[in-house]
Structure formats: C-alpha cells, structure tokens
Image (cartoon, rainbow, N blue to C red):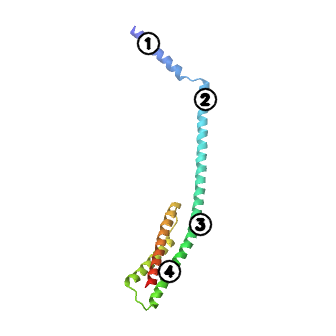
Amino acid sequence: MKKSIFILAISTFMVGMLGTSCKSDTAKEAEAEDVVEATHEAKQDEAIVEQDKALDEMSEQKVTDDVNAEWNAYKAETEAKIKANEKLISDLKLEIKKADKKYDEVYLKNIELIEKRNSELNSKINNLKVSSKEDWKEFKTEFNRDLDELGKSIGDLTRKDNKK
C-alpha cells in the first residue's frame, strides 16, 4: 500500500512537471518574438546613447568656444584697467618726486603694495588657462572683486594725497 501510494504520488508529480514544462508552438513563437523585440530595443537604446554623446560633445565644444570668446573680451577689458592702474601709480610716483612736501613711509609703502598687487593681477590674467565654464565664472568673480579692491585702494590713496 505504501509502495502504491508512493508510485502514484511520483507519477502525478512527473505528469505535472511534464505538463507545465512543455510549451506550445505559439508560446515558443511569442517568446522568440519577445527576445527579438528586446534585442531591437537594446540596439535602439545604444543608438540613442551614441546620438546623445555626439550632441553632448558638440554642445561642450560650443560652450568652450563661447567661454573662449567671452574670456578674450574680458581679458582685453581687464588689461585696459590694469594699464590704467599702472598709469595712476606712475603718476603718483611722479608726483612724489616733484613734490616739495615729504610723504610718510606708510604712504610710500602703500604705493608699493598697490603696484605689486597690480602686477600680480596682470600675471594672474595672463597665466590663466580656461578649462571649464564653472572655473571661468569663479575666476571672473574673484578677479573682478580683486580688481575693484585695487581700484578702491588707488582711489583712497589719491584722495589722501589731495588732502595733504
């Protein structure tokens, strides 16, 4: 009895396995179509990714060209400001040499510091290599601030000179 129940259970299990594992031709065709469709979609996705890469590269090149054009214009503008600062500094030095009045050492040191800072800014603008738009914006903000501070220092120095 145990043996017959065991054989019946195993037979039922085997029939169930065979029934579920065997597929009809339509099921096999549907599965094959799914595989072909998935392969086609993967190829389309690869093509889209390649197009996106090409567009990104073109966009990056345009940004680089725009940044370079902006950089060249900005460099010319700041070099003009630096040259104007150099002229003001040389005028102050010339005035000191011509003047009969004595200037204190602090005033003379301030002129030297301003001259040094002006030449540092000139070196900074001439040695910069633009690598990205973010770096360029950061540099421009910092450089404008430094240049404005230098202009203010020169202005303060000339006002002090006029008061003497």
> Is disc 2 surrounded by few (<14), some (14 to 19) or many (20+) residues within 10 Å?
few
Q: CA distance from mark 2 to mark 4?
A: 81 Å
Q: Amino acid at mark 2?
A: Ala
Which circle, 2 or 1, is nearer the viewer? 2
Q: Is residue 146 above or below residue 53?
A: below
Q: CA distance from mark 1 to mark 4?
A: 106 Å
Q: Residue at x 61, y 39 (%)?
A: 40
Which circle, 1 or 3, is nearer the viewer? 3
Sequence-wise, which precedes: disc 2 or disc 3?
Answer: 2
Sequence-wise, which precedes: disc 4 or disc 3?
Answer: 3
Q: Is residue 18 above or below residue 122?
A: above
Q: Which residue is mark 3?
A: 69
Q: Which residue is mark 2?
A: 30
Residues at badges 2 and 3 in contact (C-beta under 8 Å)?
Answer: no
Sequence-wise, which precedes: disc 1 or disc 4?
Answer: 1
Q: Amino acid at mark 4?
A: Glu
Q: Is residue 119 visible?
A: no
Residue farthest along the top direction in this orientation: 1
Residue 72 in which image quadrant: bottom right
Sequence-wise, which precedes: disc 2 or disc 4?
Answer: 2
